[in-house]
Amino acid sequence: MGILHIFDMDGTLLTGSTASLQIARHTGTEAELADLEARFASGTITTTTFSTALYGIWRDRLTPDTVAAAYAASPWLDGIAEVCADIRARGEHSLVITMSPDFFARHLLGLGFDEVAASRFPPLPLAGPPKPGDILTPADKVTITDRVRARHGVPRDRCVAYGDSMSDAPLFRHLRHTVAINADHHLADLAALDYRGGDLARAYGLARTLLTPADQAQ
């Protein structure tokens, strides 16, 4: 049956930052993004509106090389590739689910994650805005997790989720094995374990204590 490990990206693997912020820094659009994020935080725009507005900011600025450079310069947790390798060596599965654009998130496949699910945007350079149905929401994290675990024959009690904010709350309420990573107190209160630090291997080590010896032997 194996075990499924589900990781958030922004604020979790990508510590203290987001894909959008990293791209904005590399394209000189930090002011435009800050205004957009303030509107999103105030609740005046939705996730879909936010993603559509990103197209308006970046449509003449993004190339694959620009995104690759932003990804490479981003502040990632230590130990990501080592954790992915250990998961794969055990015959388990790793999945990243993020509401951020797929053209940034899919670079994580190079670190050894088995799958990355992200909001789908047109290929770079952006030829148009994303379709509303292609933008993920927090609730989609539950739907995607259940779809992937069903495909691999993994029961819900053999899934472990890692996240940092209330966008992970639906998934943390759905699963029993959860690890908050540098999380705000709202999510930390929902999590089975709370990790503070810069090394994913340590958070992953804590997560394995949630699993029974029988789980880890299979």
Image (cartoon, rainbow, N blue to C red):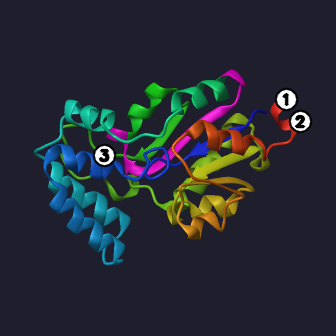
Q: Label 3 vs label 2: CA separation?
A: 41 Å
Residue 170 against residue 25 in the figure, above or below: below
Where does the image place residue 131, in percent across and percent down from the top left? Answer: 32, 54
- For this rendering, which residue is in front, 126 or 199? 199
Q: Residue at x 69, y 46 (%)?
A: 160
Instruction: For mark 1, give the secondary structure.
Output: helix
Please, what is the three-letter code of the amino acid marked with disc 2? Ala
Residue range of the region highlighted in magenta in the rendering: 89-104
Q: Nearer the viewer, residue 13 or 141?
A: 13
Label of residue 121 in the image: 3
Whether residue 156 is visible here, answered yes or no, is: yes
Which residue is label 1 attached to?
217
**Residue visible at 65% across and 33% down?**
93
Q: Which marked residue is nearer to the observer: mark 1 or mark 3?
A: 1
Give how far apart the Cα atoms at labels 2 and 1 are.
Answer: 5 Å
Report the disc number at residue 214: 2
Q: Image check: 91 left or right of 211?
A: left
